Protein backbone atom coordinates (compact mmCIF):
# COMPACT_ATOMS: atom_id res chain seq x y z
CA UNK A 1 0.00 0.00 0.00
CA UNK A 2 1.32 3.42 -0.95
CA UNK A 3 1.97 5.91 1.80
CA UNK A 4 2.20 9.68 1.54
CA UNK A 5 5.55 11.42 1.70
CA UNK A 6 5.55 15.07 2.70
CA UNK A 7 8.23 17.43 1.38
CA UNK A 8 8.54 21.20 1.57
CA UNK A 9 9.52 22.93 -1.68
CA UNK A 10 10.34 26.59 -2.35
CA UNK A 11 8.05 27.92 -5.06
CA UNK A 12 10.67 30.45 -6.16
CA UNK A 13 13.82 28.34 -6.67
CA UNK A 14 12.68 24.72 -6.17
CA UNK A 15 14.82 23.96 -3.10
CA UNK A 16 13.53 21.03 -1.00
CA UNK A 17 13.39 20.77 2.80
CA UNK A 18 12.30 18.08 5.26
CA UNK A 19 10.40 20.58 7.42
CA UNK A 20 8.77 23.96 6.95
CA UNK A 21 10.74 27.14 7.52
CA UNK A 22 9.95 30.78 6.89
CA UNK A 23 12.96 31.72 4.76
CA UNK A 24 14.44 29.74 1.89
CA UNK A 25 18.19 29.21 2.25
CA UNK A 26 18.57 28.84 -1.51
CA UNK A 27 17.11 32.12 -2.79
CA UNK A 28 16.59 34.08 0.43
CA UNK A 29 12.85 34.64 -0.14
CA UNK A 30 10.34 34.60 2.70
CA UNK A 31 7.09 32.58 2.83
CA UNK A 32 7.72 30.73 -0.44
CA UNK A 33 8.08 27.22 1.03
CA UNK A 34 4.94 25.13 0.50
CA UNK A 35 4.09 21.62 1.63
CA UNK A 36 3.74 19.08 -1.19
CA UNK A 37 2.57 15.50 -0.84
CA UNK A 38 3.75 12.66 -3.08
CA UNK A 39 3.03 8.96 -3.07
CA UNK A 40 5.77 6.53 -2.08
CA UNK A 41 5.44 2.76 -2.56
CA UNK A 42 6.06 0.58 0.46
CA UNK A 43 6.94 -2.28 -1.87
CA UNK A 44 9.85 -0.51 -3.52
CA UNK A 45 12.38 -2.95 -2.15
CA UNK A 46 10.27 -5.86 -3.29
CA UNK A 47 9.78 -4.46 -6.78
CA UNK A 48 13.44 -3.60 -7.15
CA UNK A 49 14.31 -7.32 -7.00
CA UNK A 50 12.23 -7.94 -10.13
CA UNK A 51 13.30 -4.89 -12.12
CA UNK A 52 13.24 -5.00 -15.92
CA UNK A 53 16.59 -5.31 -17.62
CA UNK A 54 17.50 -2.58 -20.08
CA UNK A 55 18.09 -3.07 -23.78
CA UNK A 56 21.12 -2.10 -25.82
CA UNK A 57 21.10 1.33 -27.40
CA UNK A 58 22.43 2.00 -30.90
CA UNK A 59 25.34 4.35 -31.53
CA UNK A 60 25.85 6.11 -34.86
CA UNK A 61 28.78 8.09 -36.31
CA UNK A 62 28.92 11.81 -35.70
CA UNK A 63 28.82 12.41 -39.44
CA UNK A 64 25.67 11.31 -41.22
CA UNK A 65 22.40 12.37 -42.79
CA UNK A 66 20.42 14.96 -40.86
CA UNK A 67 16.83 16.06 -40.90
CA UNK A 68 16.38 19.50 -42.43
CA UNK A 69 14.02 21.88 -40.68
CA UNK A 70 11.69 24.03 -42.75
CA UNK A 71 11.17 27.12 -40.67
CA UNK A 72 7.79 28.84 -40.49
CA UNK A 73 7.87 32.57 -41.17
CA UNK A 74 5.64 34.52 -38.80
CA UNK A 75 5.40 37.62 -40.98
CA UNK A 76 6.98 39.63 -38.13
CA UNK A 77 10.62 40.20 -39.03
CA UNK A 78 11.72 40.91 -35.46
CA UNK A 79 10.31 37.58 -34.26
CA UNK A 80 11.98 35.72 -37.11
CA UNK A 81 15.28 37.43 -36.29
CA UNK A 82 15.20 36.53 -32.60
CA UNK A 83 14.24 32.89 -33.22
CA UNK A 84 17.05 32.42 -35.75
CA UNK A 85 15.16 32.83 -39.02
CA UNK A 86 11.68 31.53 -38.16
CA UNK A 87 9.90 28.95 -36.03
CA UNK A 88 11.17 25.37 -36.19
CA UNK A 89 8.40 22.70 -36.16
CA UNK A 90 8.45 20.73 -32.94
CA UNK A 91 10.29 23.45 -31.01
CA UNK A 92 9.20 24.74 -27.61
CA UNK A 93 9.61 28.45 -26.83
CA UNK A 94 9.31 29.94 -23.35
CA UNK A 95 8.37 33.64 -23.25
CA UNK A 96 8.79 35.50 -19.95
CA UNK A 97 8.37 39.10 -18.88
CA UNK A 98 6.89 41.47 -16.33
CA UNK A 99 3.10 41.65 -15.95
CA UNK A 100 1.52 43.93 -18.54
CA UNK A 101 4.65 44.15 -20.69
CA UNK A 102 2.81 42.79 -23.76
CA UNK A 103 3.47 39.04 -23.85
CA UNK A 104 -0.12 38.03 -24.59
CA UNK A 105 -0.47 40.81 -27.16
CA UNK A 106 2.65 39.72 -29.04
CA UNK A 107 1.71 36.03 -29.04
CA UNK A 108 -1.79 36.80 -30.26
CA UNK A 109 -0.26 38.78 -33.12
CA UNK A 110 2.06 35.84 -33.96
CA UNK A 111 -0.86 33.42 -33.85
CA UNK A 112 -2.99 35.60 -36.12
CA UNK A 113 -0.08 36.20 -38.49
CA UNK A 114 0.49 32.47 -39.07
CA UNK A 115 -3.24 31.76 -39.36
CA UNK A 116 -3.64 34.53 -41.97
CA UNK A 117 -0.49 33.57 -43.90
CA UNK A 118 -0.31 32.06 -47.35
CA UNK A 119 -0.33 28.49 -46.00
CA UNK A 120 -3.23 29.14 -43.55
CA UNK A 121 -1.68 27.16 -40.71
CA UNK A 122 -3.97 25.94 -37.94
CA UNK A 123 -3.19 27.86 -34.75
CA UNK A 124 -4.55 27.29 -31.24
CA UNK A 125 -4.52 29.86 -28.47
CA UNK A 126 -5.27 28.41 -25.01
CA UNK A 127 -5.63 30.92 -22.19
CA UNK A 128 -5.64 29.91 -18.55
CA UNK A 129 -5.68 33.46 -17.21
CA UNK A 130 -8.41 35.13 -19.26
CA UNK A 131 -11.91 34.25 -20.36
CA UNK A 132 -12.70 33.90 -24.05
CA UNK A 133 -14.49 37.26 -24.13
CA UNK A 134 -11.43 39.00 -22.68
CA UNK A 135 -9.18 37.59 -25.41
CA UNK A 136 -11.76 38.62 -28.02
CA UNK A 137 -11.72 42.18 -26.70
CA UNK A 138 -7.94 42.30 -27.12
CA UNK A 139 -8.20 40.82 -30.61
CA UNK A 140 -10.74 43.50 -31.54
CA UNK A 141 -8.44 46.24 -30.29
CA UNK A 142 -5.60 44.80 -32.36
CA UNK A 143 -7.78 44.45 -35.45
CA UNK A 144 -7.45 40.65 -35.47
CA UNK A 145 -11.06 39.63 -34.85
CA UNK A 146 -11.41 38.07 -38.32
CA UNK A 147 -8.31 35.88 -37.98
CA UNK A 148 -9.04 32.11 -38.12
CA UNK A 149 -7.53 31.39 -34.69
CA UNK A 150 -8.88 28.54 -32.55
CA UNK A 151 -9.46 29.97 -29.09
CA UNK A 152 -10.12 28.20 -25.80
CA UNK A 153 -9.99 28.88 -22.07
CA UNK A 154 -8.73 25.83 -20.17
CA UNK A 155 -6.33 24.86 -17.39
CA UNK A 156 -6.55 21.04 -17.24
CA UNK A 157 -3.50 19.73 -19.11
CA UNK A 158 -5.05 16.28 -19.51
CA UNK A 159 -7.99 17.77 -21.41
CA UNK A 160 -5.66 19.97 -23.48
CA UNK A 161 -3.47 17.02 -24.49
CA UNK A 162 -6.47 14.87 -25.40
CA UNK A 163 -7.90 17.65 -27.56
CA UNK A 164 -4.66 18.51 -29.35
CA UNK A 165 -4.02 14.84 -30.13
CA UNK A 166 -6.97 14.95 -32.54
CA UNK A 167 -5.97 18.16 -34.34
CA UNK A 168 -3.48 19.12 -37.03
CA UNK A 169 -2.13 22.03 -35.01
CA UNK A 170 0.95 23.84 -36.30
CA UNK A 171 1.14 26.39 -33.50
CA UNK A 172 -0.09 26.16 -29.91
CA UNK A 173 0.14 28.94 -27.32
CA UNK A 174 -0.29 28.22 -23.61
CA UNK A 175 -0.92 31.39 -21.61
CA UNK A 176 0.39 30.71 -19.06
CA UNK A 177 2.18 27.59 -17.80
CA UNK A 178 1.72 28.70 -14.15
CA UNK A 179 -2.08 28.36 -14.48
CA UNK A 180 -2.02 24.77 -15.80
CA UNK A 181 -2.54 21.75 -13.55
CA UNK A 182 -2.51 17.94 -13.56
CA UNK A 183 -4.73 15.83 -11.33
CA UNK A 184 -1.88 13.41 -10.65
CA UNK A 185 0.16 16.08 -8.87
CA UNK A 186 -1.18 16.93 -5.42
CA UNK A 187 -0.30 20.61 -5.27
CA UNK A 188 -1.81 23.91 -6.35
CA UNK A 189 -1.34 25.33 -9.88
CA UNK A 190 1.85 27.35 -10.17
CA UNK A 191 3.76 25.20 -7.69
CA UNK A 192 7.11 23.73 -8.65
CA UNK A 193 5.71 20.23 -9.07
CA UNK A 194 2.76 21.34 -11.18
CA UNK A 195 4.83 23.55 -13.49
CA UNK A 196 7.39 20.81 -14.07
CA UNK A 197 4.80 18.09 -14.70
CA UNK A 198 2.55 20.21 -16.93
CA UNK A 199 5.46 21.46 -19.00
CA UNK A 200 6.73 17.89 -19.46
CA UNK A 201 3.38 16.66 -20.78
CA UNK A 202 2.97 19.57 -23.19
CA UNK A 203 6.55 19.41 -24.45
CA UNK A 204 6.28 15.67 -25.03
CA UNK A 205 3.13 16.22 -27.10
CA UNK A 206 4.73 19.04 -29.14
CA UNK A 207 7.74 16.87 -30.01
CA UNK A 208 5.54 13.95 -31.03
CA UNK A 209 3.04 15.95 -33.07
CA UNK A 210 5.60 18.38 -34.52
CA UNK A 211 3.89 21.68 -33.73
CA UNK A 212 5.47 24.84 -32.35
CA UNK A 213 4.62 25.35 -28.68
CA UNK A 214 4.77 28.74 -26.95
CA UNK A 215 4.71 28.74 -23.14
CA UNK A 216 4.14 32.01 -21.31
CA UNK A 217 6.02 32.17 -18.01
CA UNK A 218 5.61 34.46 -15.02
CA UNK A 219 8.62 36.19 -13.49
CA UNK A 220 9.60 36.91 -9.90
CA UNK A 221 10.27 40.37 -8.54
CA UNK A 222 13.96 39.79 -9.31
CA UNK A 223 13.05 39.37 -13.00
CA UNK A 224 13.73 35.61 -13.17
CA UNK A 225 11.26 33.02 -14.46
CA UNK A 226 9.07 31.75 -11.63
CA UNK A 227 9.02 28.04 -10.90
CA UNK A 228 11.72 25.39 -11.25
CA UNK A 229 14.93 26.24 -13.07
CA UNK A 230 14.60 22.96 -14.95
CA UNK A 231 11.82 24.56 -17.02
CA UNK A 232 14.41 26.65 -18.88
CA UNK A 233 16.44 23.50 -19.59
CA UNK A 234 13.44 21.59 -20.93
CA UNK A 235 12.52 24.11 -23.64
CA UNK A 236 14.43 24.86 -26.85
CA UNK A 237 14.28 28.65 -26.69
CA UNK A 238 13.94 31.15 -23.85
CA UNK A 239 12.83 34.69 -24.73
CA UNK A 240 12.71 37.56 -22.24
CA UNK A 241 10.40 40.49 -22.92
CA UNK A 242 12.01 43.62 -21.49
CA UNK A 243 10.94 47.24 -21.23
CA UNK A 244 10.06 50.01 -18.83
CA UNK A 245 6.43 50.95 -18.29
CA UNK A 246 7.33 54.60 -18.84
CA UNK A 247 8.80 53.85 -22.29
CA UNK A 248 6.97 52.67 -25.37
CA UNK A 249 9.88 50.47 -26.47
CA UNK A 250 9.85 46.71 -25.89
CA UNK A 251 12.90 44.47 -26.27
CA UNK A 252 12.52 40.74 -26.99
CA UNK A 253 15.82 39.07 -26.09
CA UNK A 254 16.85 35.45 -26.74
CA UNK A 255 18.86 34.11 -23.80
CA UNK A 256 18.75 30.52 -25.04
CA UNK A 257 18.18 29.19 -28.54
CA UNK A 258 19.00 25.72 -29.82
CA UNK A 259 18.17 26.77 -33.38
CA UNK A 260 19.85 30.17 -33.55
CA UNK A 261 22.12 32.72 -31.91
CA UNK A 262 21.66 33.84 -28.32
CA UNK A 263 21.54 37.47 -27.17
CA UNK A 264 19.70 38.37 -30.39
CA UNK A 265 17.12 41.10 -29.84
CA UNK A 266 13.93 42.22 -31.50
CA UNK A 267 12.73 45.79 -30.94
CA UNK A 268 9.05 46.70 -30.80
CA UNK A 269 7.10 49.86 -30.14
CA UNK A 270 3.87 49.73 -28.14
CA UNK A 271 1.12 51.37 -30.17
CA UNK A 272 -2.67 51.65 -29.89
CA UNK A 273 -3.01 48.76 -32.34
CA UNK A 274 -0.53 46.50 -30.56
CA UNK A 275 3.19 46.00 -30.92
CA UNK A 276 4.79 47.40 -34.07
CA UNK A 277 8.22 46.15 -35.11
CA UNK A 278 11.09 48.63 -35.34
CA UNK A 279 13.41 48.00 -38.27
CA UNK A 280 15.97 50.66 -37.29
CA UNK A 281 16.13 50.77 -33.47
CA UNK A 282 19.21 53.03 -33.41
CA UNK A 283 17.34 55.88 -35.06
CA UNK A 284 14.44 55.39 -32.66
CA UNK A 285 16.64 55.34 -29.54
CA UNK A 286 18.38 58.55 -30.62
CA UNK A 287 15.26 60.33 -31.87
CA UNK A 288 14.83 62.49 -28.75
CA UNK A 289 18.53 63.10 -28.16
CA UNK A 290 19.66 66.70 -27.71
CA UNK A 291 23.19 67.60 -28.72
CA UNK A 292 25.74 69.84 -26.99
CA UNK A 293 24.67 68.82 -23.49
CA UNK A 294 27.21 67.69 -20.91
CA UNK A 295 26.89 64.16 -19.60
CA UNK A 296 25.63 62.70 -22.88
CA UNK A 297 27.54 60.18 -25.00
CA UNK A 298 26.47 57.89 -27.86
CA UNK A 299 27.57 54.27 -27.52
CA UNK A 300 27.83 51.97 -30.54
CA UNK A 301 26.94 48.54 -29.19
CA UNK A 302 26.22 45.07 -30.54
CA UNK A 303 23.12 43.12 -29.52
CA UNK A 304 23.38 39.64 -31.01
CA UNK A 305 24.18 40.27 -34.67
CA UNK A 306 22.62 43.75 -34.74
CA UNK A 307 24.48 47.03 -34.15
CA UNK A 308 22.54 49.39 -31.88
CA UNK A 309 23.39 52.99 -31.07
CA UNK A 310 22.06 54.29 -27.75
CA UNK A 311 22.55 57.40 -25.68
CA UNK A 312 24.28 57.06 -22.32
CA UNK A 313 23.37 59.84 -19.89
CA UNK A 314 25.36 60.67 -16.76
CA UNK A 315 24.77 63.23 -14.06
CA UNK A 316 27.44 64.08 -11.47
CA UNK A 317 26.26 66.41 -8.72
CA UNK A 318 27.60 67.44 -5.28
CA UNK A 319 26.47 65.04 -2.58
CA UNK A 320 24.83 66.20 0.63
CA UNK A 321 25.54 62.91 2.43
CA UNK A 322 28.66 61.32 3.84
CA UNK A 323 28.17 58.36 1.49
CA UNK A 324 27.51 59.52 -2.08
CA UNK A 325 24.80 57.82 -4.13
CA UNK A 326 25.39 55.63 -7.18
CA UNK A 327 22.15 55.08 -9.14
CA UNK A 328 22.15 53.11 -12.39
CA UNK A 329 19.34 52.29 -14.83
CA UNK A 330 20.00 49.86 -17.69
CA UNK A 331 23.60 48.97 -16.81
CA UNK A 332 25.59 47.06 -14.19
CA UNK A 333 26.02 49.18 -11.06
CA UNK A 334 29.14 47.22 -10.05
CA UNK A 335 30.75 48.07 -13.38
CA UNK A 336 30.03 51.76 -12.84
CA UNK A 337 31.81 51.57 -9.47
CA UNK A 338 34.79 49.98 -11.21
CA UNK A 339 34.92 52.74 -13.85
CA UNK A 340 34.78 55.44 -11.17
CA UNK A 341 37.58 53.73 -9.23
CA UNK A 342 39.79 53.58 -12.34
CA UNK A 343 39.18 57.27 -13.09
CA UNK A 344 40.04 58.21 -9.51
CA UNK A 345 43.16 56.03 -9.33
CA UNK A 346 44.58 56.50 -12.84
CA UNK A 347 43.37 59.99 -13.76
CA UNK A 348 43.35 61.72 -10.37
CA UNK A 349 39.64 62.56 -10.52
CA UNK A 350 37.60 62.78 -7.32
CA UNK A 351 34.05 61.40 -7.06
CA UNK A 352 33.99 60.88 -3.28
CA UNK A 353 31.95 64.05 -2.74
CA UNK A 354 29.63 63.61 -5.72
CA UNK A 355 26.52 61.61 -6.46
CA UNK A 356 26.68 59.77 -9.79
CA UNK A 357 23.55 58.88 -11.77
CA UNK A 358 23.69 56.82 -14.97
CA UNK A 359 20.86 56.07 -17.39
CA UNK A 360 20.59 54.20 -20.68
CA UNK A 361 18.04 56.22 -22.64
CA UNK A 362 15.17 54.31 -24.24
CA UNK A 363 14.84 51.51 -21.67
CA UNK A 364 17.46 49.22 -23.23
CA UNK A 365 19.56 47.09 -20.86
CA UNK A 366 23.24 46.85 -21.78
CA UNK A 367 25.60 44.17 -20.50
CA UNK A 368 28.43 44.61 -23.01
CA UNK A 369 31.85 45.63 -21.54
CA UNK A 370 32.42 47.74 -24.67
CA UNK A 371 30.23 50.41 -23.05
CA UNK A 372 32.94 51.20 -20.46
CA UNK A 373 34.57 53.94 -22.52
CA UNK A 374 31.26 55.63 -23.35
CA UNK A 375 30.24 55.58 -19.68
CA UNK A 376 33.59 57.10 -18.64
CA UNK A 377 33.27 59.86 -21.26
CA UNK A 378 29.72 60.68 -20.14
CA UNK A 379 30.77 60.83 -16.47
CA UNK A 380 33.77 63.06 -17.17
CA UNK A 381 31.64 65.28 -19.39
CA UNK A 382 29.10 65.78 -16.62
CA UNK A 383 31.79 66.40 -13.98
CA UNK A 384 33.59 69.03 -16.09
CA UNK A 385 30.32 70.40 -17.55
CA UNK A 386 31.80 70.20 -21.06
CA UNK A 387 29.77 68.43 -23.75
CA UNK A 388 31.14 65.96 -26.26
CA UNK A 389 30.67 66.55 -30.00
CA UNK A 390 27.10 65.63 -30.93
CA UNK A 391 28.26 63.70 -34.01
CA UNK A 392 30.67 61.36 -32.18
CA UNK A 393 30.27 57.73 -31.09
CA UNK A 394 32.37 55.96 -28.45
CA UNK A 395 33.06 52.32 -27.58
CA UNK A 396 35.80 50.35 -25.83
CA UNK A 397 36.50 48.28 -22.71
CA UNK A 398 38.45 49.70 -19.78
CA UNK A 399 40.84 47.55 -17.74
CA UNK A 400 41.75 48.07 -14.09
CA UNK A 401 45.18 49.39 -15.02
CA UNK A 402 43.56 52.08 -17.16
CA UNK A 403 44.20 50.52 -20.56
CA UNK A 404 41.57 50.62 -23.30
CA UNK A 405 41.00 47.13 -24.67
CA UNK A 406 39.78 46.28 -28.13
CA UNK A 407 36.27 44.97 -28.76
CA UNK A 408 34.67 42.76 -31.39
CA UNK A 409 32.94 43.76 -34.63
CA UNK A 410 34.44 47.23 -34.94
CA UNK A 411 33.49 47.41 -38.62
CA UNK A 412 29.83 46.77 -37.91
CA UNK A 413 29.69 49.45 -35.22
CA UNK A 414 31.35 52.07 -37.44
CA UNK A 415 29.12 51.22 -40.39
CA UNK A 416 25.98 51.76 -38.32
CA UNK A 417 27.35 55.05 -36.97
CA UNK A 418 28.11 56.33 -40.46
CA UNK A 419 24.64 55.34 -41.66
CA UNK A 420 23.09 57.54 -38.99
CA UNK A 421 25.22 60.57 -39.86
CA UNK A 422 28.01 60.42 -37.26
CA UNK A 423 31.36 61.77 -38.46
CA UNK A 424 33.83 60.81 -35.70
CA UNK A 425 34.47 57.97 -33.29
CA UNK A 426 36.65 57.27 -30.25
CA UNK A 427 37.70 53.64 -30.40
CA UNK A 428 40.27 51.32 -28.78
CA UNK A 429 43.56 50.82 -30.64
CA UNK A 430 43.74 48.06 -33.24
CA UNK A 431 46.37 45.43 -32.64
CA UNK A 432 48.82 43.37 -34.69
CA UNK A 433 47.85 41.83 -37.99
CA UNK A 434 44.17 42.55 -37.35
CA UNK A 435 44.68 46.32 -37.65
CA UNK A 436 43.78 46.36 -41.33
CA UNK A 437 40.82 44.09 -40.69
CA UNK A 438 39.59 46.32 -37.88
CA UNK A 439 38.82 48.88 -40.57
CA UNK A 440 39.40 52.15 -38.73
CA UNK A 441 39.87 53.88 -42.10
CA UNK A 442 37.37 51.93 -44.17
CA UNK A 443 34.62 54.45 -43.51
CA UNK A 444 34.27 58.21 -43.81
CA UNK A 445 34.64 58.69 -40.08
CA UNK A 446 37.46 60.37 -38.19
CA UNK A 447 38.53 57.58 -35.84
CA UNK A 448 40.62 58.45 -32.79
CA UNK A 449 42.37 55.50 -31.18
CA UNK A 450 42.87 55.84 -27.42
CA UNK A 451 45.00 53.33 -25.54
CA UNK A 452 44.71 54.65 -21.97
CA UNK A 453 42.20 56.56 -19.86
CA UNK A 454 44.78 59.34 -19.33
CA UNK A 455 44.03 60.58 -22.83
CA UNK A 456 40.33 60.98 -22.05
CA UNK A 457 41.04 64.15 -20.10
CA UNK A 458 42.46 65.81 -23.23
CA UNK A 459 38.98 65.92 -24.80
CA UNK A 460 37.74 68.22 -22.04
CA UNK A 461 40.69 70.64 -21.73
Image: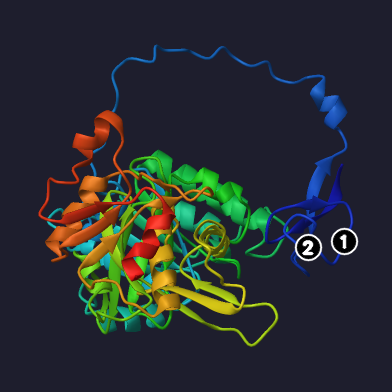
Q: Is residue 41 above or below residue 334?
A: above
View extreme (left): residue: 444
State the residue in front, 363 or 291. Answer: 291
Residue 258 appears in view: yes
Report which residue position mark 1 lands on: 20
Q: Using residue 89 as the reference point, say whether residue 353 is left or right of it.
A: right
Residue 348 placement (x, y as % from top left): 53, 63
Q: Is residue 360 above or below residue 235?
A: below
Instruction: Evaluate if marks 2 and 1 touch, with contact meaning CB atoms under 8 Å apart.
Output: yes
User: Quick one: label 2 or label 1, which is nearer the N terminus?
Assistant: 1
Residue at image position (33%, 50%) is: 304
Report which residue position mark 2 lands on: 33
Residue at image position (57%, 53%) is: 198
At label 2, counting other C-alpha atoms closer than 10 Å, the crowd grade (few under 14, some 14-19, many 20 or more) is many
Q: Is residue 322 above or below residue 87?
A: below
**Mark 2 falls on what kind of element?**
strand
Query: Residue 181's image quarter?
Result: bottom right
Residue at image position (46%, 77%) is: 130
At label 1, counting other C-alpha atoms closer than 10 Å, the crowd grade (few under 14, some 14-19, many 20 or more) is some
Residue at image position (24%, 58%) is: 425
**Mark 1 falls on what kind of element?**
loop
Residue 150 appears in view: no
Quarter of the image containing the C terminus? bottom left
Quarter of the image containing the N terminus? top right
**Badge number at residue 258:** none
State the residue in front, 69 or 28. Answer: 28
Real-space CA distance between mark 2 and mark 1, rounded to the nearest whole angstrom: 7 Å
Q: Using residue 409 as the reference point, say whether residue 451 is left or right of it.
A: right
Residue 397 placement (x, y as % from top left): 42, 51
Q: Using residue 118 as the reference point, say whether residue 459 is left or right of it.
A: right
The coloring applied to the image is rainbow
Amino acid sequence: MAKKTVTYICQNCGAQYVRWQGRCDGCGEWNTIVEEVSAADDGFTKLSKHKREGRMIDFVPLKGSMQTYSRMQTGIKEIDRVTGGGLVPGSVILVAGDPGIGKSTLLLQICAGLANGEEKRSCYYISGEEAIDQVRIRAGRLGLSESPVNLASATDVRNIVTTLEKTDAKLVIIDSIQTMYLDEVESTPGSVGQVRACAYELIKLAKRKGFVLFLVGHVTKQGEIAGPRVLEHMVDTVLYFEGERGHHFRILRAVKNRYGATDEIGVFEMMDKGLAEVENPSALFLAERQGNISGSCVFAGIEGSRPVLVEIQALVSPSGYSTPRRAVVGWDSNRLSMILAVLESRCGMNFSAHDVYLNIAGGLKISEPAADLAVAMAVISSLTNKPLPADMVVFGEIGLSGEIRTVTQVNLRLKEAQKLGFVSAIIPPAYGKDKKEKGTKNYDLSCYEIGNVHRLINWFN
